[in-house]
Image: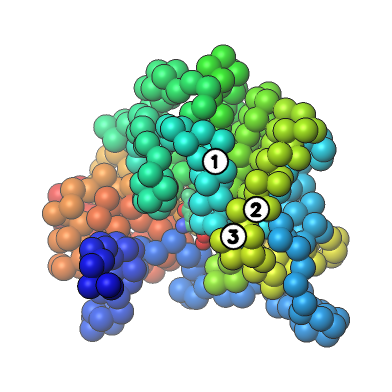
Amino acid sequence: MLAGLSSQTPDKIMALMRAYAADPRTDKIDLGVGVFRDPAGRTPVMAAVKTAEERLWRNQDTKTYVALEGDPAYLAALSGLVLGDAVPADRRAAIATPGGTGAVRMGLELARLANPSARIFVPDPSWPNHAAIIGFLGLERVDYRYYDAQARGLNIEGMLADLGRAGPGDVVLLHGCCHNPTGADLSAQDWQAVAGLLTETGAMAMVDIAYQGFGAGLEADAEGLRILAGQVPELLVATSCSKNFGIYRERAGALFALAPDGPTRDLAQSNLTMLNRQTYAFPPDHGARVVTEILTDPDLRADWQAELEGMRLHMQRQRQGLADTLRDLGGSDRFAHLGAQRGMFSLLGATPDQVERMRAEHGVYMIGDSRINVAGLSPDLIPRVAQAMLAVGL
Ligand code: PMP
């Protein structure tokens, strides 16, 4: 029976990680996989996470099941972090999920339950797993214009024109901040325009926010999402604690469904609970509990926020450092976008051939679409990366 399976294309990022690990060059540079790196190249456990884990170890006296939707304290703390007071609590349905990927999957499952012929509007480009999950669920995907490769920035006119074609029963997927892979985000004004458009057309937005705190700051990164939440009647929000708490492998995330009224909220909640139950019953708890401990203890929360802010500023400095070095070495401002964009990722604008040459000739690894993880840079590495880029003709 198993022989009847068709083979699946391996995940490109995992394949790149394997190629990097197998490369014997000692001066190779990894700008591929999306994890934070400190100046020494490590992905450390954050201090607040260590403290919270220690407390958990001391104080936790049972590991019995919690609830199908996850721990209510976690969902309350996380919904405060992400949504602030943009929407009253009695309009929020929520489930804990295994990471942001679980949240995206459950959000799309919920949309499919509500409307099996929903079209999912996805930015071009987007995190590849969006298209993969949509395709796997048998939903129709419509790509909308998002990034202008020539101008190296957001194409808001094209985006609004394409989103104007989404209607009731459709879902518009948006990145909350730190767009993956482009680093080009919507301004508050752009979010207002999207909110106005969605109110007009009746399409429902689903915001995927996986990097809150990595862009302009914890509150600023949630601003757009909150603008939307305050104006549209319905909204899905998929959030991840992988990056901003540095707990990638613990799989902590959540899906929020904001409903127009109490009865619809209850309907959404019962469907979300059912989705958790029949997929994995109980969502992972350890990472969620660590997050709750941090968010609900003012000292721990302050400590976490300070470390997160340090990480954000480190990434911002690497961006600016690369942009400045390219300007000095190349004598033009065509890479200024790298300094202006936000979050972990930007596109260099290289062809697949140039990406391959940077790997083969210079040991610089990045995703095939020329997405780099700026956290993989450091002041020592920036000149080499800039020289490699210019050497391959960028
Ligand atoms: N959404 C986006 C846009 C992402 O980039 C990621 C992480 N690569 C995720 C969701 C999910 O992350 P995780 O499942 O590790 O929490």
> What residue is pinned by disc 1?
113
The answer, for residue 303, to whether it is visible in the render is no
> What residue is pinned by disc 2?
274
Q: Secondary structure at mark 2?
A: helix
Q: Where does residue 35 sit, x and y in percent of width and height?
A: 48, 65
Q: At label 3, which amino acid type do we have?
A: Gln
The answer to whether 157 appears left or right of 237 in the picture is left
Q: CA distance from mark 2 to mark 3?
A: 6 Å
The answer, for residue 42, to whether it is visible in the render is yes
| Residue density around tag 2, few if under 14, some if 14–19, many if 20 or more, within 10 Å | some
The answer to whether the residue bearing label 1 lies less than 8 angstroms from the nearest atom of ligand 1 is no
The quadrant holding residue 192 is top right
Residues at circles 2 and 3 in contact by the CB criterion of under 8 Å: yes
Which is nearer the eye, 115 or 215?
A: 115
Q: Secondary structure at mark 1?
A: helix
| Residue density around tag 1, few if under 14, some if 14–19, many if 20 or more, within 10 Å | few
The answer to whether 351 appears left or right of 87 in the picture is left
Q: Earlier in the sequence, mark 3 or mark 1?
A: 1
Which is nearer the eye, 274 or 238?
A: 274
Which is nearer the eye, 31 or 319?
A: 31
Q: CA distance from mark 3 to mark 1?
A: 14 Å
**Residue 278 circle label:** 3
The answer to whether 358 appears left or right of 182 in the picture is left
Question: What residue appears at the point 76 percent right and 79 percent down from the top-left corner?
Answer: 63
Q: Where does residue 278 sit, x and y in percent of width and height?
A: 59, 60
Question: What residue appears at the point 35 percent right and 41 percent down from the top-left corner?
Answer: 125
Question: What residue appears at the point 15 percent right and 61 percent down from the top-left corner?
Answer: 357
For residue 122, above or below residue 192: below
Q: Where does residue 154 sit, x and y in percent of width and height?
A: 41, 31
